[in-house]
Amino acid sequence: MRFAALGDSFTEGVGDPVPGRGWAALLAEGAADPRRGVEFRNFAVSGAQSADVRNRQAPAAAAFRPHLASVVVGVNDTLRRTFDILLLARRLDEVCALLTGGGAVLLTVCLPDPGAVLGLPAPLGTPLARRQTAVNAVVHALSDRYDAVHLHLADRSWVGDRSLWSPDRLHPAERGHRTVAAGFHALLAARGLAPGAAPGLEPRQPPPGRLDSWRRLATAGTGWLARRSTDLLPQLVCLAGAELWHRARGTGAHLDRRAEDALRSALAALPPRAAPGTAERAAPSVPVAVARARMEG
């Protein structure tokens, strides 16, 4: 069984104390028939945006001809001044079409907005939440469109459980990675696509101490802030200023309507699906059947 993982640092495995592991590698261990093994390739790169996944990761993953392919990206798009929900929807649709066209079953996730995870004040957090809500809506639509195995992680229980998050509050800790892996395994097993044992939920590595947590937070957080200082921070200031201005005028709903209109336009602009069985896109039930047949020999 071949499993390809695409995305950003969430899938690359950042936050897992075992270097190079993360939820996708944990899932790979339990998704394959123990007698036949699994070939796992992680194409995810920290900081990747939807354009990176479409232009670089997806072609390489398609050449690998995976039975399963996870596509988790979008948070980094929301943290840039170039955020465009229409472009993001178009890019993700192209990635999904390419992978399912080769017979892969897609794995997708909707994630909490980074403002909620970081506990940002409302003027800063609300604009990010608005963007992440739009990204999640696109992911939901494309998951239905391509019959993906979809894991929902955007609820308050995921945000509020500190044991799931690493000290930087930006990436899952080992427990978080294991929770994601176990959630996907259960969904795949329900489709008959995960004959192996489910990943355990309990961490195998001791949790970092307070000093180690502060050290990691200082090093990772400082580096992240430096990389984002010329892009994200000015954008957040502008977004927060607009939020406060509209709130003072009692027109905050205008920003919500504008975001909703942009989302509707993005979903409406997706190209029509090709007829079932064409090379570009397969019918929703085809990837599952193809993957199961290929996995069984």
Image: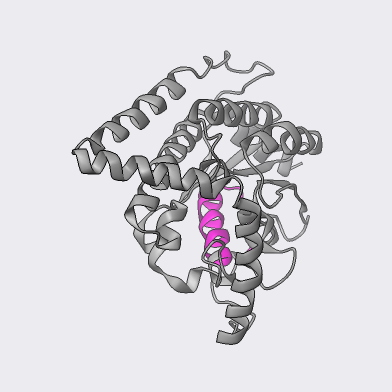
Looking at the image, what colour scheme do you see? Answer: one colour
For the point 57% across and 27% down, the residue is 93
- Give the answer, above or below, for where 133 lies relative to 198: above
What secondary structure is the magenta-colored segment mainly? helix
Residue sitting nearer the eye, 43 or 273: 43
Name which quarter of the figure residue 134 lies in.
Answer: top left
Q: Bounds of the magenta span?
A: 177-197
Picture coordinates of residue 140 (x, y %)? 44, 37
Q: Is residue 192 magenta?
A: yes
Residue 194 seen in the figure = no
For the point 56% across and 23% down, the residue is 283
- Give the answer, above or below, for where 55 lies relative to 22: above
Residue 59 seen in the figure = yes
Picture coordinates of residue 231 (x, y %)? 59, 45
Residue sitting nearer the eye, 159 or 229: 229
Q: Is residue 235 magenta?
A: no
Name which quarter of the figure residue 153 lies in.
Answer: bottom left
Q: In this view, does 219 lie to the left or right of 176?
A: right
